[in-house]
Image (cartoon, helix red, strand yellow):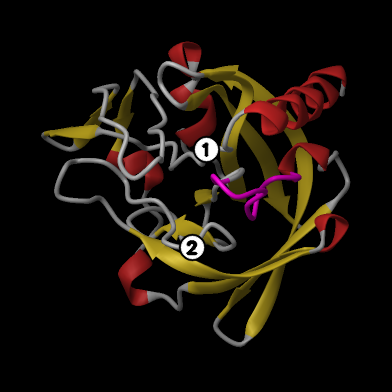
């Protein structure tokens, strides 16, 4: 986990000299092309939030579960190892073609147009790593390690997922097929920003993705 430690050191160092800047979700700036999403168009920074860049094509069918609209949505996320207990906001594609970020820096969200947690496929949960005033909901996401558990409330029951991996990717080399591709079993993708901070773009250069599978 040397990479994770490096992120922490960098983030603290930057915190002394400039305001922390949050980031939004990994499906930033999609352009609809038939049944697919072409991701990679850059979006201007809005209200101090930097957009993630994922320059790859994503098939919407790969992100969709059996019938997300007809199932109970997830409403809460708990990560005991990090002390995270947050409601889950529904995240949709905005009019600008970008996936909206959570309104609250202290809360996470899920991509309501994709797989519902607990259904086969990769359900996407995301949140800010920090804000101009300090740490946000996924500030410690880099600390998760294989074997840790993540719980999602869906309907009246809790679903437990076990972390299998945590990886950093440069935004310019984001492996969309690996992160968003179909899976035969229910999985989670918890996503935030990471890596070094790009002062000119007011955003982090990497994405952090935590992989988890339903227990």
Residue at horizontal 76 percent and vertical 45 percent from the top? 140
Q: Residues within 10 Å of mark 2 (few under 14, many from 20)?
A: few
Element type where label 1 sits in the image:
loop
State which quarter of the image contains the C terminus.
bottom right
Closer to us: 204 or 93: 204
- Please, is residue 205 above or below residue 50 in the view? above
Q: Position of residue 128 (x, y in %)?
A: 55, 47
Residue at horizontal 42 percent and vertical 30 percent from the top? 52
Q: Which residues are magenta?
A: 131-140
- Please, is residue 93 above or below residue 29 in the view? below
Q: Position of residue 204 (x, y in %)?
A: 54, 25
Q: Residue furthest top?
A: 173
Q: Residue furthest left?
A: 34
**In the picture, residue 108 is in which quadrant?**
bottom right
Name the N-terminal-most of marks 1 and 2: 1
Q: In the rendered view, does 56 fall on the left or right side of 81? A: left
Kindly report the secondary structure that dominates the magenta region of the rendered protein.
loop
Closer to us: 117 or 125: 125
Element type where label 2 sits in the image:
loop
Q: Position of residue 118 (x, y in %)?
A: 58, 63
As for residue 116 lying within the magenta part, the answer is no
**In the picture, residue 96 is in which quadrant?**
top left
Q: How many marks?
A: 2
Residue at the disc numbered 1: 21
Q: Residue furthest front?
A: 17
Residue at the disc numbered 2: 104
């Amino acid at each position: 986990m040397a990479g994770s430690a490096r992120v922490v050191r960098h983030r603290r160092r930057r915190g002394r000299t400039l305001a922390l800047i949050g980031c939004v979700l990994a499906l930033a700036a999609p352009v609809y092309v038939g049944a697919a999403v072409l991701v990679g168009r850059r979006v201007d920074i809005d209200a101090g939030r930097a957009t993630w860049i994922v320059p790859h094509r994503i098939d919407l069918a790969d992100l969709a579960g059996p019938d997300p609209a007809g199932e109970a949505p997830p409403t809460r996320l708990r990560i005991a190892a990090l002390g995270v207990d947050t409601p889950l906001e529904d995240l949709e594609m905005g009019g600008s073609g970008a996936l909206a970020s959570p309104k609250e820096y202290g809360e996470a969200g899920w991509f309501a147009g994709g797989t519902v947690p607990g259904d086969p496929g990769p359900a996407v949960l995301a949140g800010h790593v920090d804000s101009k005033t300090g740490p946000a909901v996924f500030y410690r996401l880099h600390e998760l390690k294989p074997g840790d558990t993540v719980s999602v409330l869906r309907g009246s029951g809790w679903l437990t997922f076990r972390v299998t991996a945590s990886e950093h990717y440069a935004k310019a080399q984001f492996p969309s097929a690996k992160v968003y591709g179909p899976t035969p079993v229910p999985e989670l993708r918890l996503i935030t920003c990471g890596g070094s901070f790009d002062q000119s773009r007011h955003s982090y250069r990497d994405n952090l993705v935590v992989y988890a599978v339903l227990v």
